[in-house]
Image (cartoon, coloured by chain):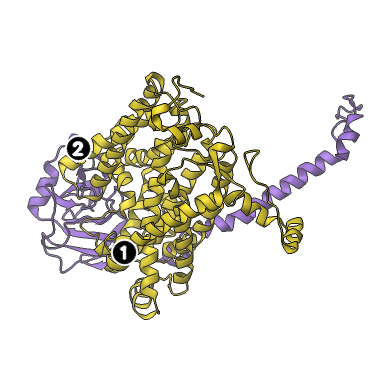
Chain colours: A yellow, B purple
Amino acid sequence: MSFSWAKPYEPKHPLARWLDERLPLPRLVYGAIGGGYPVPRNLNYFWNFGVLAGIFLTIQIVTGIVLAMHYYATADGAFNSVNQLIMRDVNAGWLLRYAHMNGASFFFIVTYIHIFRGLYYGSYKAPRELVWMLGLVIYLLMMATAFMGYVLPWGQMSYWGAQVITGFFSAFPVIGEPIRVWLLGGYAPDQAALTRFFSLHYLLPFVIAGVVILHIWSLHIPGSGNPTGVDVKDEKDTLPFHPYYTAKDGWFAAGFLLVYALVTFYVPNYLGHPDNYIPANALATPAHIVPEWYFWPFYAILRSCTFNLFWIDAKLWGVLAMFGSILLLFFLPWLDKSPVRSGNYRPMFKRFFWLLVIDVIILGYVGGAPIVWWRTALGQIAAAYYFLHFLVILPLVSAFETTDPLPNSISESVLSGDAREAPVAVAG
Amino acid sequence: MATTKASAGVTEETTGDGVHKDIRRRDFLNVAAVSFAGVGTVAVLAPLVIQMSPSADVLALSTTEVDISKVQPGQGIKTQWRKQPVFVRNLTAKEIQEANAVSMSDLRDPETLAQRTKPGHANWLITLGVCTHLGCVPLGIGEGENKGPYGGYFCPCHGSMYDTAARIRQGPAPKNLAVPEYKFTSPTTVQIG
């Protein structure tokens, strides 16, 4: 698509030529993920996680459609349809359910690695700002889908998760509570909420698939980035996607899916919460209520706001900070102005990047653990640092940092390694 | 478009009665058509929006009768109103005294116990069992549950603590536990809602 040396699609078979003149779908696929898409030759294994995310989206859609054939979206029947019917009676139902349940966790694992890959290698920088922002849209849609999916088994965690998360809206003054009641279709989660969550949980993955197409489309205009962050200069810098990267993605996916299979078969409930095997009870909240692990860092930010500030109360601060922590990522391309993309050539940025990783892990730990005073304090420090990193440290680092010299080209860095870099930084 | 060609020839001159000549029949048709479509779109969207709101059968659950004859001082019961938990608590004299001893300036959401109960029934504290933070059910109504340091309720989700008048004292919740509308239909029966 993007480079002049990209191999054009040349159908050999008369039938393929006939089709190409009428509906050039094979041409589109060839140019997108076939021999017609030139990719930098120096990609490392962190570049495999985009394809893996696509694989997990597919797994979730396929297992989800099948589970929906056996699931009852009724407040009386949902719990038993999952835990009795699907887990015991439906042939291979246990496998499909566990695959779907853990598939969500693995989808988030690969997505988080994919996002942090982008943060380290500056994948959000020009000309790929829209790729980054569309990715964030996908991530937000994933969070909504995962939350609504978690409600469907109608266990205690499902029910109270729905109560707490729709409660976020009640933080907004005046309009908040009517919005919450409107979203739930009642004053507390019940049949109306369950049915609409089921409907949306079925819909949103297809919306995600649509935005994924936009995400890939906007990526393929400038072409994929690479670990040096240096632009592709000529044909020597690239390899055709097929067979080189289809093979590498395939082999890596096989290895990664093995880990997924190990968890699904041997410790299927490790990432879940035992309280969700208790049917929903509107009169008793579980003693320790937490969301699924992939929401823990945000949950920690929510809980860190324990004090009123200015005219805004603690509850609204918590909700604003939590949503703000994701929304600020949309501005990342303009917060980090350094012309050097890759963290490999940014000594100061690199250190702060790893601090951020540690910070998010601390937030995750605090968000998943019961509240005690020192954890609250730790969470507050970590939450403050999260915002400090993006709003203060990154702009300052990009202004004052002296970057290391960049290689002249991708092929040169591949052939001679870092030792023979160009003497002068070519900051583009 | 054909219309632009027609309008190009029209000048700004006005007719004798002051009506602009460059306002054409077609302009009226455009405005009318777009308005019609706009109103129609809103009319179509309305059912899509209001279908989400609580239906009549959900709203019909809005009154509940509770028999409180068996609740001794110091005890409480949990009941349901609009699918939400309601705490009905028979306060002891000591709890009432504790609630009245608190100065208003110490409260985040200042209300006296008298404002939160019915005249002549000062010992009956009836509140929603919904934490005003994010809607969990606080502990403290059942026998032996953790009442928190202020002797009222304690929310296990995010650590909000309420006193014996169910007023917020510490933690992230912004408001006191809500007092629903209710009336005593007899000395031992309460109608909530």
The image quarter in which residue A328 lies: top left
Question: For the residue carrying disc 1, how many other residues have a C-alpha within 10 Å: few (<14), some (14-19), or many (20+)?
Answer: few
Q: Is residue A187 visible?
A: no
Q: Residue at x 76, y 42 (%)?
A: B31
Q: Say which element carries label 2.
A: helix
Q: Which of the image's four quarters has the N terminus of chain A? A: top right
Left or right for B56, reference A265: right
How far separated are the C-alphas under marks 2 and 1?
Answer: 37 Å
Question: For the residue carrying disc 2, how many other residues have a C-alpha within 10 Å: few (<14), some (14-19), or many (20+)?
Answer: few
Discs 2 and 1 share one subunit: yes
- Counting residues from the start of the chain, the first of labels 2 and 1 encountered is 1
Q: Is residue A287 visible?
A: yes
For the residue pair A179 and A253, the one nearer the viewer reads as A253
Q: Which residue is mark 1?
A: A262
Q: Which residue is mark 2?
A: A377
Q: Say which element carries label 1.
A: helix
Location of residue A104 in the rendering, given as x and y in whole percent from the top left corner: 39, 58
Q: Residue furthest left?
A: B94
Q: Residue at x 51, y 50 (%)?
A: A244
Chain of the residue that carries numbered disc 2 in the rendered image: A
Q: Is residue A209 above or below residue A354?
A: below
Instruction: Name the amino acid, label 1.
Output: Leu
For the residue pair A254 and A336, the one nearer the viewer reads as A254
For the residue pair A108 and B12, the one nearer the viewer reads as A108
Location of residue A374 in the rendering, given as x and y in whole percent from the top left corner: 16, 40
